[in-house]
Image: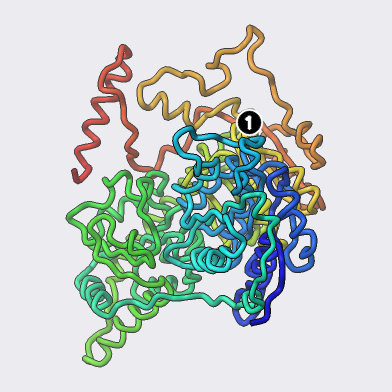
Amino acid sequence: MNTVRLTMAQALVKYLAAQLVDIDGNKLPLFEGVFAIFGHGNVAGIGEALFHVQDQLPTYRAHNEQGMAHAAIAFAKANNRRRMMACTTSIGPGATNMVTAAALAHVNRLPVLFLPGDTFASRIPDPVLQQIENFADSTITANDCFKPVSRYFDRITRPEQIISSLPMAIATLTDPANCGPVTIALPQDVQAMSYNFPERFFEPKVHHVFRQPPDQRQLMDVIAAIEKSEKPIIIAGGGVHYSEAVNELMSFAEKLNIPVTETQAGKGALLWNHPNQLGSVGVTGSQAANVMVAQADLIIAVGTRLQDFTTSSRTLVKDTQQLVQINVAQFDVIKHNALPLVADAKLALQQLLYCLLEKNKHEKEAKYQVSKDWLSTTQANMAEWNKVVEEKTLATNEALPTDAQVLGAVNRTIDPNDVVVCAAGGLPGELHKLWKTRDARGYHVEYGFSCMGYEIAGGLGVKMACPDRDVVVMVGDGSYMMLNSEIATSVMLGKKLIIVVLDNRGFGCINRLQQACGGAPFNNLLTDCKTIEEGAPVIDFAAHARAMGAFAEHIQGIVELEAALKRAKQSNRTYVISLNTDPVHTTSEGGSWWDVAVPEISQRKEVTEARVKYEEAKKQQPY
């Protein structure tokens, strides 16, 4: 057996560089590169190793560990999980800064490889700088925080362990059902140890998309359920995109006359003006979708976890309705007592359509097709909803425009194939309801973890994945303040972003929720917080962005915003536009109930009154 002597870190990066993926016949690197912030736990080991493979595995320097991990995750999401990135940090705070991002990737089933440095395996210099000591268990380090938010976790204590660990890591990252974050903790002394690795370990490996075919018994059960239905409806989730089944979904819906609703992750499965489009569903849904879901006799969920925002905390989808779950993950497919079909969405939709049409053809019967009256009702409801969209997003001369008016201006001004990015606060709800998606890849909202701070860093990752598209980040002042440092990274890497900062002077979304639950305005808007007599400072976001190398301007109102967006489109560098917005008003139309527990006892009558309404609403839940 031929061998090559390398350090563990050198062998690791050599292995990552040898991983390829076949995308439409093109062999591309599986890993776009490695985001790295070096410290004493990784600079001498993996840092030195990365230096020598820059041509095959580029290293990107970020400004915040959580931010770079968000960028890596967004890159994978924008690539429909086909390609990905790795992130390496030192031990201690560098590592734990990535735990939030690991949780985000875990919730959203997105691949990212975490390579945090770790304390000495030998333990000779313990305790080292940044080491967490557990008095009862000496094997625990800061990296154990990754265990509950990783799909696969390992700690390398001998160099040869990567021979078995790395293939397991790659298998997890590329598994459609088990996809998610992988953490391989790297003790700093082991990174520098050498070993005679088999040369065949580093041979190029091409990964192909694995598609789980449907079980024939499950397939027949689902076909029977569809054939019995007169008013079916589809809920399209993120799995439609990850399976690259957009065309299959469209064909299935068109040929069978079935309306389609979309989750946050599924938005864009059909374009906004498609005849079968019924809009967003659930808490942040359209009136058209939620009314018709309630009337449906069969709900076909494709590639969705059916989280509480989609099901309106289990009040929108009733026990009396038949639910079919098409999902590649067994864990998801059995939720809500559904009729399961474990399968890749593309294959499932292809085979379902073929069987529904061909079976009836052979029996010389009219092929299965939903009554056009059901689809006509869809179109009529959607036409009414589109009037609401136009009304809410209409430009006005108000000094403080609403979020809806701002997103309307952005939607009207940018190109159809540009990508909008968002994550937290009130904006995702408004975008889900009101954004007109004109390209299947044009909507990138992280709402599984709803992580404040994802927006700008995520925009960077999307731009790295889609260099030929403008990426427009919509972010509130609260999220901007939490994590904005990757503006500097975008300038440094020449990855232009357009960032629209909506400054409502606080956490407007949670302030509205607080009052809806009967609470007094408290600690959300800056005017309701404990401050000095002069109040909280007025933050000049444009000046701040300019200090990080971006072009920036602060504007007033919608007319100025549309003009500024045109200037931003012409810019060759990240461009930040800030404007003051209304913290109070939001689009109440369309959405349905969300279970947020109201206290049973309170000194405020408003809370007591809200509790009564809460208990009444909970009666709609199945148990």
Drawn side of residue 203 relative to residue 335, left or right: right
Q: Label 1 is placed on what type of residue?
A: Asp
What percent of the width, then of the height, locates residue 167? 54, 69
In the rendered image, which residue does mark 1 sit on? 503
Q: Residue at x 45, y 28 (%)?
A: 512
- Residue 542 versus residue 385: which sits nearer the camera? 542
What percent of the width, then of the height, locates residue 567? 78, 47
What percent of the width, then of the height, locates residue 591? 38, 43
The kind of secondary structure element at disc 1 is strand
Do we see residue 615 in this rendering? Answer: yes
- Residue 32 versus residue 231: which sits nearer the camera? 32
Drawn side of residue 609 relative to residue 71, left or right: left
* Number of marks drawn: 1
Q: Residue furthest front?
A: 124
Do we see residue 391 in this rendering? Answer: no
Q: Residue at x 67, y 77 (%)?
A: 199
Q: Residue at x 71, y 66 (%)?
A: 6
- Residue 182 versus residue 75: which sits nearer the camera? 182
Quadrant assignment for the C terminus: top left
Q: Residue at x 37, y 56 (%)?
A: 305
| Chosen colour scheme | rainbow
Q: Residue furthest top?
A: 533
Label 1, residues with CA under 10 Å away: few <14, some 14-19, many ≥20: many
Looking at the rendering, which quadrant does residue 338 occupy?
Answer: bottom left
What percent of the width, then of the height, locates residue 220? 24, 78
The relative height of residue 288 versus residue 454 in the rendered view (above or below) is: below
Looking at the rendering, which quadrant does residue 304 occupy?
Answer: bottom left
Quadrant assignment for the N terminus: bottom right
